[in-house]
Image (cartoon, rainbow, N blue to C red):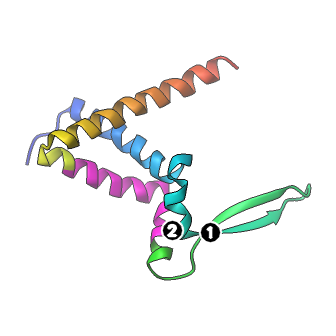
Amino acid sequence: MNEIGLTVLLILGLASFRLTRLIVFDKITEPMRRPFFNEIEEKDENGKEMIYLVPKERGIRKWIGELLSCYWCTGIWVSIFLIALYLEKWLLGEIIIIILAVAAIGSILEVIVTKSLR
């Protein structure tokens, strides 16, 4: 097994963070998540309509819906995928990992800058 140093671990961690957020939360992947959830509309105490996403009731769609609704669960599978890409030493895999890590740094900096401007 290849030895993974601190720098590689940091890059893989950042890439895992960004890809997990992309899959679980980002608007661009919402169409991918939609088949695995039911939308439930409820009104809160002020009469405002709230929409909740609940995993489908059974089968593979339920399993995938539950996976996609759990940031931690999705993060494990994403980490396995990214480590496999890294260990295979494919150039495209390394490029994807670096892009995700750089995007993660950008995301983190954006949150810091936005909070400091408030």
Q: Which quadrant does the C terminus fall into?
A: top right
Q: Secondary structure at mark 2?
A: helix
In terms of sequence position, does the residue under pointer 1 or pointer 2 come before the other?
1
Residue pointed to by mark 1: 54
Q: Residue furthest top?
A: 117
- Magenta extent: 64-84
Residue beneath the point at 34% across and 58% down: 77
Question: Is residue 81 a member of the stretch shown in magenta?
Answer: yes
Asked if the residue under mark 2 is in contact with the one under mark 1, i.e. CB atoms within 8 Å, the reply is yes
Q: Position of residue 99 (x, y in %)?
A: 32, 34
Question: Is residue 38 a member of the stretch shown in magenta?
Answer: no
> What's under tag 2, amino acid-wise?
Gly
Q: Secondary structure at mark 1?
A: strand
Dot 2 surroundings within 10 Å: few (below 14), some, or many (20 or more)? many
Pick whichever, 101 or 10, lies toward us: 101
Residue beneath the point at 54% across and 49% down: 25
